[in-house]
Image: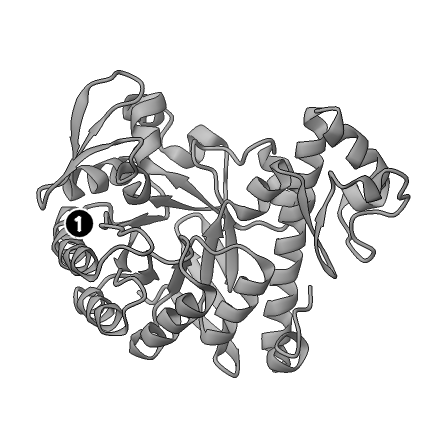
Amino acid sequence: MKHLRIGSTSGKARAGTLILEHGKVSTPFFMPVATKGSVKLLSNEEVESTNTECLISNAFILHMKPGLEVIEKFGGLNRFMGWKKGLFTDSGGFQVLSEKFMLSLTNEGVYFRNPFTGKKMLFTPETSIKIQNSLGSDVAMCLDDVPRAGDPKKRVEEAVERTFLWAGRCKEAHSNRGQLLFGIAQGGVDRKLREKSTNQIIGLGFDGIALGGLAIGEPKKKMLEAIETSIPLLPEEKPRYLMGVGSPEDLIKAVSLGIDCFDSRMPTMNARHGTVFTESGNLNIDSSMNRLDPRPIGKNCGCFVCRDYSRAYLHHLFRTKEENALKYMSYHNLFFIQNMMNRIRESIQEGKFEKEFMGGVKR
């Protein structure tokens, strides 16, 4: 079955529909991060009201808490969360390889210390896929080896080879027929390694291809060059996923290169630190300039926060550490991004994307 249907193009930008077990998702699309099964500070109803059609949760975290036996009892992660739309699960590779968790790394898998029990555990590609099969998400992601930005070439080469090895094992272990499986290409910002990994992952025949190991601290120019290296190699008929990108400017640029889906904690994380998106760029709500400002965050934003509250009021809530400030700003940022993605889709369908978005960042 063909899961991605491209209906329109404008330059390299593509608009279409991704068909999932839990419904259809209009592409290109952005997924808010629901690591533990919830978008921080927001209810499912609030998230859905921002025009969000798909979320991404973390299989590694969820298998530890609340545990698979709990989620399986509810018939899968969608039902446990009460989320009726599209759902991806990340393998947890980025988290398990962090210094917070990882004890050692081998071709067999990752040895880590469970932060809840203190026990040493082995996390393998087979383990990751078994967990995601049980969670029943619409899309499962392969376990990959993610090198850090600035790592030496030898470490990136090792990550490329291990990612390929693990991808083959993930595909072999995958048994949930209602669930799509996406492979992840690594390679850092090295052009030859990025080409090699992309071709290797494509050759395994996954349902979609993700570009991983980017937006983790490398220069923006290098990130875009890595994307441009991979795009010509990717199959036209399969979804293209750029992991970890969520700023308005980066989303627009990546769509212009031909990317179909994105995820990032940036919109909600920035909001919790007092940064909100506006038509003219980011705004620091903590700035004293907002103390007497009667304007909404966004002049043309249609969200309830901009309809009902002033910058001065939000500044007051943030300064006095009222949790509602974080909630309101999280909602605004997510609404802002999803509204922008909707406008992007419309502009592609009308053949006007390059004219409307590439002459300057339009939200």
Q: Residue at x 50, y 41 (%)?
A: 84
Image quadrant for the N terminus? bottom left
Residue 94: x %, y % from top left? 31, 44
Residue 25 at least partly seen:
yes
Q: Is residue 159 above or below residue 5?
A: above
Provide residue 64's location: percent of width, then percent of height. Answer: 30, 25
| Residue 235 location (% of width, % of height) | 31, 75
Disc 1 on helix, strand or loop? Answer: helix
Q: Indicate whether 72 appears above or below 296.
A: above
Write down the residue under mark 1. 170
Q: Is residue 339 left or right of residue 160?
A: right
Above or below for 8 versus 362 = below
Q: Position of residue 82 (x, y in %)?
A: 50, 32
Viewer-proximal residue, 79 or 321?
321
158 vs 233, nearest the viewer: 158
Query: What colour scheme was applied to this rendering of the protein?
Result: one colour
Residue at point 52% right, 83% down? 11
